[in-house]
Image (cartoon, coloured by chain):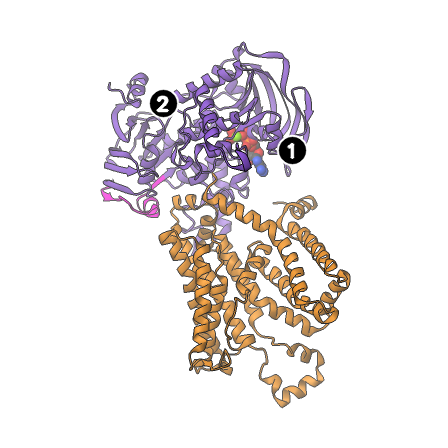
Amino acid sequence: MKFTAAALKEKILKGSLGFTLISMVFGFSLGAIVLLVAGFNPIQAYWEILKGIFSKPKYMSYVIIYATPLIITGLSVAFALRTGLFNIGAEGQYIMGAMTAAAAGYFFKLPMVLHVVVAVALAVMIAALWGGIAGYLKARFGVNEVISTIMLNWTALYLSNFAITIDAFGRSGTGKTYTIQDTAFIDILGHWKRTPEGIEFLRNHPMLWDILKSPVNLGFIFAILLAVMVWYILNKTTLGYELRAVGHNPFAAEAGGINVKRSMVVSMFIAGGLAGAAGAFQVLGVSHRIAKLAVMEGYGFDGIAVSLIGNNTGPGCLLSGLLFGALKYGGSKIQDAMNAPTEVINIMIGTIIIFVAMPKLIRLILTYKSRRGVK
Amino acid sequence: MTSIDFSRKTVEMIDVVKKFGDFVANDRISLTVHKGEVHALLGENGAGKTTLMNCLYGLYRPTEGKIRINGKEVVITDPNVAIHHGIGMVHQHFKLVEPFTVTQNIILGQETTKMMGILDLAAAEKKVSEISEKYGLTVDPRAKIEDISVGSQQRVEILKALYRGAEILILDEPTAVLTPGEIQELVTIIRNLTAEGKTIIIITHKLHEIKQVADYCTIIRRGKFIDTVEVAGVTEHELASKMVGREVSFAVDKRPAQRGERVLAIENLVVKDNRGIQVVNGLSLDLHKGEILGIAGVDGNGQSELIEALMGLRKVQSGRIRMRDKDITNASPKQIISEHSICSIPEDRQKRGLVMEFDVAENLILENYQRRPFSERGVLDHQEIYKFADQCIMEFDVRPQDAQMTAKSLSGGNQQKVIIAREVSNDPEVLVASQPTRGLDVGAIEYVHRALVEQRDRGKAVLLISFELDEIINVSDRIAVIFEGRIVGEVDAENADENNIGLMMAGGRV
Ligand SMILES: Nc1ncnc2c1ncn2[C@@H]1O[C@H](COP(=O)(O)OP(=O)(O)OP(=O)(O)O)[C@@H](O)[C@H]1O
Ligand SMILES: [Mg+2]
């Protein structure tokens, strides 16, 4: 491949990146119309969002905190999709990961780094099995993974809510679990910033202080590492080669000696583990406990959009997750600034996201169908 | 023949250029076809025939050039516009929806509806059977596509175009998948169509077919227009050398086989097809080192299922398959390929042979990605992978010479070359070749046949399945005839008699 100016232009026009950018422009225009219809000045609103994201270091760190779980669930969905599997179950796998991390973080008494490692490993393992179930059902009995993962989502939700009712784990009457041990925290300077020396130091460093006002934690760094890992596995390893071959053409993969059924299980296993990691980092770094869920929180579902916008690649999910996080956090700012109700904000965000993701979703459904039927 | 109306030019393509990036697939090609004419397009694999026809059918927009239909200049933006102008196309690789029935596929996008948009399947089925009877295109309107043979699928494609009222019919290598008998039927169909004033553009690599059905022939070489000739005035050899630009030999030249010990033994094999019908019925077969065993037979007599069972892709109901005295019945595809050294050139190259979204290099390691030097401890070595790909591309003359090209963007014949390169470079003990030259040009066929013979000469065994009796007789050392899932006769290729084999293929006794 040559990198001439013409080739670059063609890439942008025809390639996925240019496509995404163009749909983003459309998405934001449509979002503006939504605001206009609801009686708000879209220019002012977008300006507030921009200010709400970039005007303070604290805001930016919030964006990152919002984005972290979305990036990772996005990676989960993307990973399964590359094997031709639609992981609607990232939500449930996330819940399983969060629950396991909360339990391991609370019940175990371990030294600092080790506690985090154990809690994350357990969470990833349990969530991976949760995803693996769907893969196994598909490989063994031909159960469509979309259906099985949806059911597993509900199972996970109720399992988690049930766990909270257990006295040893949940603080009775609050609908929440006990806070995990300090040793399992992944907050950055979480303790130090509350000690007298810390407060003293931060007073002289307002910028750092501002950042540390938000629950900054190591989750984002892990998210970057995971994005790189996903890219590496898919493109550089024999495992990734197998999974991609199965995703594109299971018949040829089978004829070439690749174990298609095993690939499905492995892919869902890894996808589940990723979503579980998202839940674990959220618990260890932000919430430090889990609470009773009235409805699904949507981290896994948002992951579908993140994956689609990110073109189902590791680095793509990183960028689109940040975009998503920025919209979510920045969007909340128009509420205070312009008195816009949350419903309008959510509709605006939804419009933008749908517009960016929809063409890809359609393409996905078409290829998904053709993989089954059209020759 | 006599049906041409020279006063009416139905298709005129003038100086058509089609570029893919920097690559020029069609370089100022012109083509004129009259009403009632059969016009053949001839050219090597990758010459640009399909691309040119895709421009006519609206699948591609020409980079330059004009198209006139019935004297009027048109811009064909998509196939719907083409259909509107009465152009129908049967693609080299079918575009059918597998879980749908024959009728459903034919009416797809043209559904006849009763009141309130309810599908009128009965009416559609009736119309389909009318057309199919009229032209002798026998198909079961209610069968599912995934259950019928490649040959029948092809007939469905032709029916589909006729159903939409095509006046100009483009047939992209229609005979590549047909049996000799079916080809004769198709010839009759084509004659009926032209007699009714329809215009046919046909792409084929088989020169005798051009001689048989076409009035005019346009020759393309590497994207460039070479000549348009009146078929009656040229010989097959002249056509071939115009196309390749050098002399080609049709005969397979080979020394007598040095037949060695038995490597593969199939005993009383029973296999079912997708519908659960037993299509391989107690088949027995021996294959020896150093020989090419040809399996002659009409499509749909259990060949596909036999091969799939042999390659571990389909369950064996009963019977045994032994390779070098090891039982490999129902072994996994991986074991069969890597441990037992049986490789196969599959009959359906786009379904079983290639991952179309992968590039050439990735496709070439499909069976070996786990081995050195392509990977070590689970990590791919792209440098080695592309080095190997470049070698294969050179050796097997894959065009264009670009290992990063996706399989999807290769011409049909070049896709086949990639598969052959992969399987032959595996150097298997047994090479199974199903329709290995389907869709290849004469030059490439020469090459494949030589590759098979070379494999044999190195003491390996080759199992050749082909619906083309000529190919079977020319290439094989021994011929087994398959009929209704059994081997009904075996003959030495030396003294094979085409008529006898033909009779056995049809289930007759000799
Ligand atoms: N979408 C595409 N992108 C890039 N190159 C393409 C594309 N489609 C075709 N080509 C190239 O254009 C050339 C002509 O291809 P085409 O399919 O027209 O060949 P053909 O004459 O039909 O050959 P065959 O007999 O093998 O079917 C080939 O080199 C092919 O690789
Ligand atoms: Mg072609």
Mark 1: few/some/many CA within 10 Å (<14, 14-19, 20+): some
Q: Amino acid at mark 2?
A: Leu
Q: Quadrant of residue B169?
A: top right
Q: Quadrant of residue A353?
A: bottom right
* Colour in which the image shows chain B: purple
Query: Where B498 falls versus A181 (above or below)?
Result: above
Q: Residue at x 68, y 67 (%)?
A: A341
Q: Nearer the viewer, residue A267 or B453?
A: A267
- Say if residue B44 shows up in the picture: no
- Judge from the rendering whether residue B334 lies leftward or rightward of residue B27; answer left or right: left
Label ID, residue B469 = 2
Q: Residue at x 74, y 68 (%)?
A: A338
Q: Are marks 1 and 2 on the same chain?
A: yes
Q: Quadrant of residue B342?
A: top left
Q: Residue at x 42, y 30 (%)?
A: B141
Q: Secondary structure at mark 2?
A: helix
* Labels 1 and 2 touching (C-beta < 8 A): no
The percent position of residue B189, horizontal first and vertical second, equals: 47, 18
Residue B331 highlighted magenta (yes or no): yes
Q: Nearer the viewer, residue B410 or B32?
A: B32
The percent position of residue B20, horizontal first and vertical second, equals: 62, 37
Mark 2: few/some/many CA within 10 Å (<14, 14-19, 20+): many
Label ID, residue B77 = 1
- Residue bounds of the magenta highlight: B323-343
Q: CA distance from mark 1 to mark 2?
A: 42 Å
Q: Amino acid at mark 1?
A: Thr
- Say if residue B416 shows up in the picture: yes
* Colour in which the image shows chain A: orange
Pointer 1 or 2: first along the chain: 1
The percent position of residue A295, horizontal first and vertical second, equals: 52, 67
